[in-house]
Image: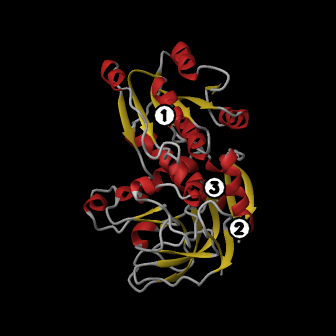
Amino acid sequence: MRAVVLAEHGEPLELRDVPEPEPDPDGVVVETEACGICRSDWHAWQGHGDWVDDRVPTGQVLGHEPVGTVREVGADVETVAVGDRVVVPFSLADGTCPACRAGRQNYCEGATALGFGPAAPGAFAERFHVPAADVNAVHLPEGVSAVAAASMGCRFVTAFEALDVTADVGGGDVVAVVGCGGVGLSAVQIAAALGATPVAVDVREAPLELAADIGAAATLNAEAVDAPERVRERFGGADLSMDALGSAETFRTALDSLGSGGTHVQVGLTGEADRGEVALPVDRLVQDDLTVAGSRGMPPRRYDDIFAMVAAGQVDPGALVTDRVALREVPDRLAAMSDFDTVGVEVVTAF
């Protein structure tokens, strides 16, 4: 079958013929209908993450935001059948560790990440394998399209978990979202749906325009204005800030936008320039009673909460999709991310 493979870090990705997957006793093989193209794939391609022992090895099939139809089922699988349409979280839990038993499968101690390690070849492929399918294969409601489900990927669910659980965003909260890529735009739409007032911050006009279309109460171009100052002037400071990109600059822009008692949630991972480390303004944390938290992914059990919001028309992940592409185009679309030459969410729909 055809798949997009990481041949060498930073070198063009390759479209190759690779062996067909076979189901483990607890796993299923899924025929890919759609898969989002995410900046995390770009980080993997660039070879980032060695500073936290998280560098994706060469030879890896990438792709971690899939939806598809189950074609083969392992002998021990109980809740998934051939023909089921499923969406799969990028963090594949084993379902047995203390974190899993506590309902925190996104922090599974034995997790493997789809598309990021040899044990879990990804979904930039005609078919892919899902281990521990009773935990990781989430049934897709009929009313949710493959493209919309793929656009949820890691970005939409990460933003939802960060806002709804980690930060407990509520009506009237001002939410400053810095970096309006896929996860940032998802956060804008979700914050609006939760009754908050989203403020979108970026250095490009195109994503800011899209942010305004999907619910941002205000948009700020950080190259043209002092974004934190504007947030404080207009709103008295944000109740919540999110760095959806992952750099020292975007982190400080987000944190400096907070008002007294505010919370910052970090979801963006850093690149080579920062290598996992950014400075904290510790005195201000103390003086203004600020909280800094991290958030990663979402437990599979919470997909139903998002599906319910989709069914009610409260959120529309498909509105973030700006392009549908073929599998052969993935290398070029990831390369475009190097210059931030993409807007919204791009989804592979032809394999």
Can you say whether 51 is above or below 142 in the image?
A: above
For disc 1, the neighbor class at 10 Å (few under 14, some 14 to 19, many from 20) is: many
Comparing labels 2 and 3, the label whose residue is closer to the camera: 2
Query: Residue shown at 42%/41% (left/top)?
Result: 277
Mark earlier in primary sequence (3, 1): 3
Q: Amino acid at mark 3?
A: Ala
Q: Which residue is mark 2?
A: 327
Going by the picture, which residue comes out furthest to the left? Answer: 98
Can you say whether 75 is above or below 62 in the image?
A: below
The residue lying toward the viewer, choosing from 200 and 193, is 200
Marks 3 and 2: in contact by CB < 8 Å?
no
Q: Amino acid at mark 1?
A: Phe
Q: Position of residue 113 (x, y in %)?
A: 46, 64
Q: Position of residue 325 (x, y in %)?
A: 74, 61
Q: Which residue is mark 3?
A: 148
Q: Quadrant of residue 149?
A: bottom right
Q: Position of residue 316 (x, y in %)?
A: 62, 46
Label 3 secondary element: helix
Q: Quadrant of the N terminus?
A: bottom right
Mark earlier in primary sequence (2, 3): 3
How many angstroms separate mark 3 from mark 1 (CA)? 29 Å
Query: What mark, if any, has residue 208 been given in the picture?
Result: none
Q: Which residue is mark 1?
A: 251
How many angstroms separate mark 2 from mark 1 (CA)? 33 Å
| Residue 236 seen in the figure | yes
How many angstroms separate mark 2 from mark 3 (CA)? 18 Å
Comparing labels 2 and 1, the label whose residue is closer to the camera: 1
